[in-house]
Amino acid sequence: MSVLSEIRPQNVFSFFETISSIPRGSGHTERISQYCDCFASDRGLKHFCDEIGNVVIFKDGSKGRENEEPLILQGHLDMVWEKDPDIEFDFMNSGLNLCTDGEYIFAKGTTLGGDDGIAVAICLAVLDDNSISHPPLEVIFTVDEETGMEGARGIDVSSLKGKRMINLDSEAEDVLWVSCAGGARADISLEVKNEPNTLKAYRLLITGLHGGHSGAEIHKNYANANVLLGRTLKEISEKTDIYISSLWGGKAGNAITPLAECVICTSDDISGIVSDCEKRAKEEFAQSDPNIEFILTQCTAEKHFSKETGDRVISLLSLLPYGVIKMSGDIQGLVQTSLNPGILSSAENAVNVGWSVRSSVNSEKEELINQLRILAEKHGASFDTYGGYPAWEYRADSPLRDRIAECYTALTGKKPGITAIHAGLECGLFSDKIKGLDSVSIGPDMQDIHTPREKLSIPSVKRIYELLLKVMEVI
């Protein structure tokens, strides 16, 4: 049964509902790539799907506009998979449970994937409607944006002719994004040795945190569950002997970790220490994360890390750097440099921590990466960095930006904000690949992306769609 069939623009939300039924987490975009490929084939549109899953669809200009300069439209196919801890949900095999209150669309218990599913839906609606006035279109759907922009990094753009691009990965309707930070991913892997467990075992769950986008919301002082877990384990270990059996916290470097858990083996009662740590966390984050909970329950564990390797793990976790490192001196309120330890996991013989590092100053980004490398070396761990992407530099002369701003004012009676964003956008990679590219990022209002509270504004989608149609008409 359709949930969004009565919502306008109906063509946009119909496509959004369809793609929301297709599992499309980062690294698992085969089915959504295939859907877009079939969409183009069914409509006789020239297109290609490359070996990593990027899809590019071409559409001739509308009647009388066939020879105009092409316009590139771009969004990404993948989404972040996060869910509430108390629900069971099979992201690999299930479509999202969409809901609406008439003002917003959200998904029951999980992320919505409005980032960037609404861009895909808008582009498909444009391609599907032959009544729209537009120049020749080159529509790019990339994969794995959320895990290092691998699609944009690997795509071959030699067949593209456009020199102007509208990226639809913004989450603020009244702002044109024209610059963004560069970034990279960094991983530390610490080998551990396992021993049979003969002690009591406790499961410590740190939950109830706000979470959020590690670029767009890193300045809001939200607690990171991995950081809290490291602090807590350090305090417990200073008061009694403990052995770590397993760890987990977060799946995405670009999501502020909302919950983390650890299985602790010990002969002592640690409930009082945990309670004290919870009390301090509640006081420290009373404004940003009022619902923090530390839940300690007894469980079973067959083995744990050796004391020596476990202590190194606790030391590493107690030193996790996180948050805003420096604010911009040029743009008020803009984060210049930050990092987020969004991934924590333990496998058979190793503990792994993954960061998202961002900066609009390349030297500061490299210095942060070097600090993480030193942290790894000090703990006898291996270090790797990957997925680096360039900053998207501000362009003083941008006819596309000026035209979009004019159209926005004509439609709303207001001037849009024009600003940079700390979050990464694929515009930087495409600007490197397509010399002279004039690009702007727009999109509808969304809240709490990368969390199960993610919401997409219905009226804002309508206005952004109308803005895009107007821009294409007059560009």
Image (tube, rainbow, N blue to C red):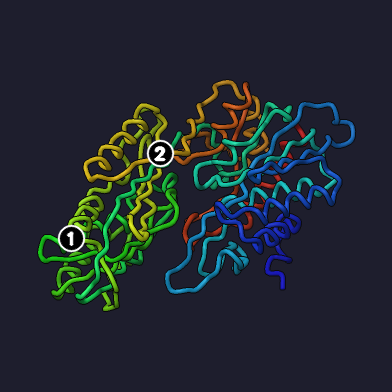
Q: Quadrant of residue 100?
A: bottom right
Q: Along the horizontal axis of the image, is 463 left or right of 235?
A: right
Q: Are marks 1 and 2 in contact (CB under 8 Å)?
A: no
* Above or below 327: residue 239: below
Q: Which residue is mark 1?
A: 307
Residue 364: % across, % down: 34, 30
Residue 390 percent location from the top left of the image: 49, 31
Q: Is residue 182 above or below residue 220?
A: above
Mark 2 is surrounded, within 10 Å at the Cα level, by few (under 14), some (14 to 19) or many (20 or more) other residues, namely some
Badge 1 element: helix
Q: Which amino acid type is shown beneath numbered disc 2?
A: Thr
Asked if one can make out residue 35 in the rendered structure from this viewpoint, the answer is yes
- At x 40%, y 44%, the residue is 356
Task: Report x, y in % for residue 394.
Answer: 51, 26
Query: According to the image, label 2 marks what residue?
Result: 385
User: Which amino acid type is shown beneath numbered disc 1?
Assistant: Lys
Secondary structure beneath disc 2? Answer: strand
Quarter of the image where one finds residue 62: top right
Q: Earlier in the sequence, mark 1 or mark 2?
A: 1
**Residue situated in front as seen by the camera: 209 or 76:** 76
Q: Is residue 98 visible?
A: no
User: Residue 76's x, y, as percent?
Assistant: 61, 46
Q: Residue at x 64, y 52 (%)?
A: 118
Q: CA distance from mark 1 to mark 2?
A: 29 Å
436 with respect to 338 (left or right): right
